[in-house]
Amino acid sequence: MKKATFLIVLLIVLSLVFSGMLLAQAKKGGGAIAATAASVWDYLKKEGYAKNWKMWPGTTSMYQGPEPHGAFLTTYVNDAALKAITGKKGKFSDGAIIAQDNFSKDKKLKFISVMYKVKGYNPQGGNWFWAQYKPDGRVEAEGKVDECIKCHVVQKGNDYVYTSKLK
Ligand code: HEC
């Protein structure tokens, strides 16, 4: 009888530890978001990226940008991406997200362009998930988008990004 009680308690403790581990994993953020435009958009909204995330170090709100993204740009990064940039790591870690607001000449928000680093997602393309949205969340492009990759591949040595040197 005692043994049975002990086993039951052990089982309960083990299952608590295990679910705690799962929860901690989910809370880590980045890595837990599915590589789909819908779930990345939900995450950006939930985070309030344009209010709560840092801007890419060295950039300001509405800086003048080159084509094709728009006349003015504001580029936000999550914590994982920020660490890679400030730490001069040369590469982003899994879970890094860059969200760039793209404005027209008259400073209207036209698109939001996103890069999200996903473990094993696309080894030939730096494991980036690409997405572009209209301001209301409508998806213009998502996934391993050739158009995005074709241009960003020029920066392959800089983990596919343009805004600043990662080393
Ligand atoms: C013709 C070239 C070109 C194409 C096509 C292109 N980009 Fe870019 N992208 C750039 C340039 C140049 C920058 C740097 C702008 C700046 O000064 O921040 C940039 C910046 C970005 C950034 C900020 C991080 C960085 O690289 O500095 C994101 C995110 C981004 N692009 C996403 C996308 C997505 C998503 C697509 C496809 C829907 C796409 N881009 C297509 C040229 C391109």
Image: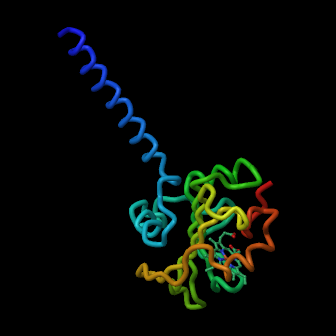
Q: Residue 140 location in percent, x, y?
A: 52, 84
107 vs 6, nearest the viewer: 6
Q: Which quarter of the figure is the C terminus placed in?
A: bottom right
What residue do we see at 37% from left, 29% from top?
Answer: 17
Q: How is the image coloured?
A: rainbow
Q: Nearer the viewer, residue 150 or 7?
A: 7
Where's residue 113, x and y in %? Answer: 57, 75
Image location of residue 14, percent across then percent down: 35, 26
Residue beneath the point at 55% across and 81% down: 141
Q: Tally the numbered discs.
A: 0
Left or right of 25? Residue 2 is left
- Residue 160 as seen in the image, left or right of residue 79: right
Residue furthest bottom as drawn: 106
> Ligand 1, what quadrant?
bottom right
Q: Residue at x 69, y 51 (%)?
A: 86
Q: Does residue 15 appear left or right of residue 137 in this picture?
A: left
158, 12: nearer the viewer: 12
**Image-quadrant location for residue 100:** bottom right
**Placement of 117 over or under 63, stated as above or below:** above
106 lies above or below 57: below
Residue 68 place in picture, x, y as percent:
68, 86
